Image (cartoon, grey):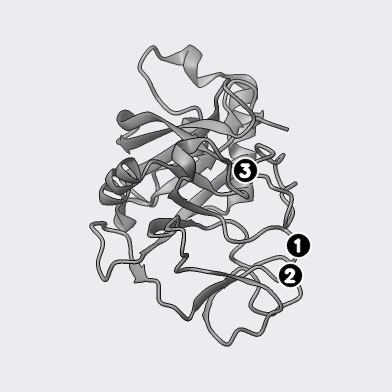
């Protein structure tokens, strides 16, 4: 699979010359031109684009591609993102309240339950599981067991239930660059979508359950965050 930077550069070059919406009347994700089919004959794509409602409001649509043809599977659904909207491409910083822009793999699913209906790799969260957000730590942006070698971290088994199920967005994970941002997930939203996240993508629990049940690690799932296909640029700068 191509790196997020390489994929985004291909995405930009493609759409500067041709808008995908202008070459076909059939629906397809805005990021379609940035994805190749060499490694996966089918590919699952989650697309999250800004909504007009407010800076932290967005819409999520799930697609599957087979032999270059696209089919919309889920959505569009309302979601919430970081309180300060989308960061510009490669501009995400720790603690900025923004959701990163770009195209990233979907990693492991996680949750409170012992098992979850999903074809992603699943990891149950326990009381001693934390995600490190300390940029000075060698464990930065990783899931570890307590005691952590870090000054700050986030519990994966949260008392408010926001992480009762979710999936990791593989942003800044290989390698983790200090201060570039950490703990970017898809998870349950707060207060029925009336409150933003710190940088994650959050949605209604029932819809998240459907999304996780659909995702399959063997179909190269990726998430396209905040990209505008018509201009080949990041939305929400």
* Position in image of residue 179 (x %, y %): 75, 62
* Position in image of residue 100 (x %, y %): 64, 46
Looking at the rendered image, the quarter that the C terminus falls into is top right
Callout in the foreground (3, 1)? 3
Callout in the foreground (2, 3)? 3
Q: Name the element at disc 3.
A: loop
Q: Is residue 21 above or below residue 182?
A: above
Labels 3 and 1: the sequence-earlier one? 3
Is 208 left or right of 22, judged from the image as shown?
A: left
State the residue lying farthest toward the bottom: 147
The residue depicted at 38 percent of the width and 12 percent of the height is 25
Mark 2 residue crowding within 10 angstroms, few (<14) / some (14–19) / many (20+): many
Tag 2 near tag 1, CB within 8 Å = yes
As measured in the structure, the alpha-carbon distance from the residue carrying label 3 to the one carrying label 1 is 17 Å
Residue 179: image tag: 1
* Position in image of residue 166 (x %, y %): 40, 56
Residue 157: image tag: none
Q: Nearer the viewer, residue 20 or 182?
A: 182
Q: Nearer the viewer, residue 2 or 27?
A: 27
Mark 1 residue crowding within 10 angstroms, few (<14) / some (14–19) / many (20+): some
Q: Name the element at disc 2.
A: loop
The residue depicted at 26 percent of the width and 61 percent of the height is 116
Q: Nearer the viewer, residue 173 or 130?
A: 130
Identify the residue position indicated by label 3 in the image: 82
Labels 2 and 3: the sequence-earlier one? 3
Q: Name the element at disc 1.
A: loop
As measured in the structure, the alpha-carbon distance from the residue carrying label 2 to the one carrying label 3 is 19 Å
As measured in the structure, the alpha-carbon distance from the residue carrying label 2 to the one carrying label 1 is 5 Å
Identify the residue position indicated by label 2 in the image: 135
Q: Nearer the viewer, residue 7 or 154?
A: 154
């Amino acid at each position: 699979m191509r790196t997020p930077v390489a994929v985004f550069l291909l995405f930009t070059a493609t759409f500067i010359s041709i808008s995908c919406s202008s070459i076909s009347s059939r629906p397809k994700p805005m990021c379609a031109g940035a994805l190749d089919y060499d490694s996966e004959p089918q590919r699952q794509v989650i697309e999250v684009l800004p909504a007009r409602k407010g800076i932290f409001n967005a819409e999520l649509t799930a697609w599957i591609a087979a032999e270059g043809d696209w089919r919309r599977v889920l959505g569009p659904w309302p979601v919430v993102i970081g309180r300060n909207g989308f960061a510009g491409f490669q501009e995400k910083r720790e603690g900025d309240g923004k959701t990163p822009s770009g195209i990233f793999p979907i990693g492991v699913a996680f949750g409170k339950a012992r098992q979850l209906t999903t074809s992603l790799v699943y990891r149950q969260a326990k009381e001693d599981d934390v995600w490190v957000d300390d940029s000075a730590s060698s464990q930065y942006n990783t899931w570890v067991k307590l005691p952590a070698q870090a000054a700050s971290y986030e519990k994966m088994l949260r008392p408010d239930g926001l992480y009762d199920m979710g999936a990791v967005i593989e942003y800044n994970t290989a390698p983790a660059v200090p201060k570039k941002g950490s703990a970017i997930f898809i998870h349950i939203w707060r207060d029925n979508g009336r409150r933003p996240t710190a940088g994650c993508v959050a949605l209604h629990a029932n819809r998240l359950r459907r999304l996780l049940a659909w995702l399959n690690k063997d179909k190269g799932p990726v998430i396209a965050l905040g990209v505008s296909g018509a201009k080949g640029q990041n939305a929400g700068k």
